[in-house]
Amino acid sequence: MLQNIGDKFKGTSEGGSGTHRWIWYIILGALILSFIAWGPYSMFNTSASQSGYAARVNGEDISSDEINREWQQQQPQLLQAFGGQLPDAQRQIYQQKLLDSAVRGLATTQYASKLGYAVSQAQLSRAFQKEEAFQWMASSACRPRARASPPSA
């Protein structure tokens, strides 16, 4: 098939006239111009990475890098759940859920700020210190122990 196309392009095939050659030149030229104008990656949706944000909530951006990082963290679990191969339809669903979650989180934070809910760094620090789940480092059982010296021979 490629040989046939090449022959028609050169005008050496059976019945190959100069007219066919010019049609091939026009098609090839249009392809070259489209790659020059939009680049070879224009078929992929790169609008989020070009703009720098994946979504905008009330004028505040959610970074596309942040969404990509979240996706990279979730992808291994999803691949494991789907037996190593994540179908495109499922991938799109999970990516949309991830974006929706980020939008909801930012909208909730904005709304809480608007209502005047805020936590100072000192309040946050005290809350962590009081929480039992974060006390494991303070207990002696979890502190690193000195390594035993190797047995002498």
Image: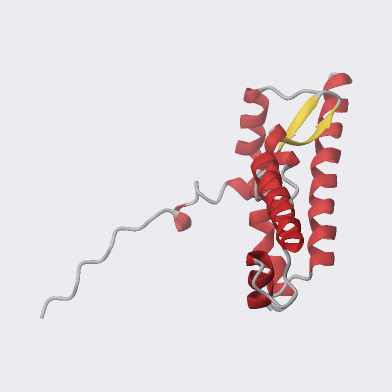
Give percent across and percent down for residue 80. Answer: 68, 73
* Front one among 3 and 55: 3
Q: Position of residue 145 (x, y in %)?
A: 35, 58
Q: Residue at x 45, y 53 (%)?
A: 140
Quarter of the image where one finds residue 60:
top right
Question: Which residue lies most toward the left here?
Answer: 153
Where in the figure is residue 53, as x and y percent of width and height?
73, 35
In-image side of 38 versus 111 (left or right): left
* Total number of numbered discs in the rendering: 0
- Could you tell me residue 71's position as x and y percent? 69, 53
The colour mode here is secondary structure
In the rendered view, does 149 fall on the left or right side of 144?
A: left
Q: Residue at x 85, y 46 (%)?
A: 100
In depth, the one of 115 and 110 nearer the eye is: 110
Left or right for 153, reference 104? left
In front of the other: 64 or 150:
64
- Which corner quadrant holds the C terminus? bottom left
Instruction: Tell me: residue 4, above or below residue 50.
Output: below
Q: Which of the 4 image quadrants contains residue 16?
A: bottom right
Above or below for 62 versus 87: above
The one of 11 and 102 positioned closer to us in this rendering:
11
Measured along the vertical axis of the image, is residue 62 above or below residue 58? below
